[in-house]
Amino acid sequence: MSQDRGQGRSMVISQTGIVATESPLASKAGAAILERGGNAVDAAIAAHAVMTVVAPMWNGIGGDLFAIVYDAKSGKYYGLNASGWAPAAQSIERLREKGLRDMPAHGIEPVTVPGSVDGWQKLLDRFGKKKMNEVLAPAIQVAQDGYPVTEWVAQHFASNVDLLRDNEAAAKTFLISDRAPRLGEIVRNPDLAWSLQQIAQGGRDAFYRGEITKRILALSARHGGTLAAKDFSDYSSEWVDPISTTYRGWTVYEMPPNVQGIGALEMLNLMEQFDLHSYGLNSPRALHVQIEAKKLAYADVIRYIGDPKSSKPPVSGTTKAIWSRSSNPTTRNLARGLLRTGLDLFCTIAERFSAWIQRRRTLSRGTSGRCTLLFRRSWRKTRFGSRSVSWVDGIKRRPTLNSFRTSWISIRTFRRPSKRRDSRSSLSPGATSCSKTGCPAM
């Protein structure tokens, strides 16, 4: 193993588990939950909640959540789709009357009902050991006491400062004296701390039926939006069966439509037909295969993938169409392939096993608990969400619908019944990969 190392630091080895996120504060929160007897699901939510505070340009409690949970005891994978649906009053006719052909990238129109909080609740109810107030306590403290701005977050603040200034509430929430927070400065978000405290005390109902809901609806009304109380009270995330393929002896799991995970599986099926190892890492020949695989896969995603409840994509037919380009239609796997396809790892947590983290891989042995992998892919054009930030709750709304043309939305998004999710989520939730000899491994 030492001959394959690309860094000089020692491997990370733990008895209680490892939490890897974009922020040391989030990883610390998750690891502390594990040390106090929580499991991987508890730690994942604790870490995710802190990330909503320290990385406000990504998805927070105003956005969506996807999770793939591996239960070692049953040997099963469980998927949770907590993507929100469009307001029932939103329609293609209404958007056209406002002179819109494309869904705007910012503002109230592309905002959907947030799904993250309901996703937290369902994960805790089914798999967790801790209560909501326990897992949210670290995030509440960070929001109240503040956090030092890191280089990466400072760059995002600086590059989006003009957009944040355009909205009074966003400027009040994220800017310091009308400028972007700088590296090392302490940023506090007491309004978000209040919202998280409400959720900690009242669970998901505090977000979908309580004071937070009223404030979100008031904000929507002020900006001419269509969100209604029933959109929130009726919302419920869904347990789904992950889809999978195999890639060079590894099994890869992704979330089914309405998300784009099937595209990653198609890429792997296509790339498996080429001897990429012999081509050399990042060689022109290898990159050409990977780029063409992406182009073909995304063409199929755009053509076929939507919300099964509203657009009724022919899933079995789609699967055949997507995989027919591979000479081996048998579903195949990920591990190293995931790293090449450019998927964006958000949070990886595994409990109760000795782990070696090397480069960007995790190899594990002796697993006795759960491995929870939460992934997200945020839209590069819409950092900091819709900018519809309410000063009373500190929540930014994620503009889920903002890449769809209104002519296309009429087919995929606003089809009755009203309970429809954003037709093709921009997220590509990550895969959990399991080796032929043991789980979990990535």
Image: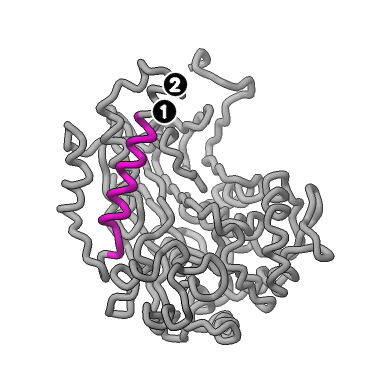
- The residue drawn where x is 57% and y is 64% is 385
- The residue drawn where x is 20% and y is 49% is 319
**Residue 1 vertical position relative to residue 371 in the rendered view, above or below:** above
Which disc, if any, is residue 413? Answer: none
**Residue 348 vertical position relative to residue 283 in the rendered view, above or below:** below
Q: Mark 2 — residue?
A: 283
> Image quadrant for the C terminus?
top left
Q: Amino acid at mark 1?
A: Leu
Q: Which one is in front, 298 or 418?
A: 298
- Give the alpha-carbon distance from disc 2 to disc 1, as whole Å: 6 Å
Is 76 a magenta residue? no
Could you tell me residue 38's position as x and y percent? 51, 53
Q: Is residue 120 visible?
A: no
Residue 216 as seen in the image, left or right of residue 93? right
Could you tell me residue 248's position as x and y percent? 28, 27
Q: How is the image coloured?
A: one colour
In terms of image quadrants, where is residue 431? top left
Magenta stretch, main secondary structure, is helix
Looking at this view, name the residue that lies furthest to the top. Answer: 3
Residue 327 as seen in the image, left or right of residue 169? left
- The residue drawn where x is 75% and y is 70% is 172
- The residue drawn where x is 25% and y is 67% is 311
**Residue 59 vertical position relative to residue 386 in the rendered view, above or below:** above
Could you tell me residue 260's position as x and y percent? 35, 52
**Residue 193 vertical position relative to residue 272 in the rendered view, above or below:** below
Q: Which one is in front, 60 or 134?
A: 60
Circles 2 and 1 in contact, beta carbons < 8 Å: yes
Q: Mark 1 — residue?
A: 287
Could you tell me residue 259's position as x and y percent? 35, 56
Element at badge 1?
helix
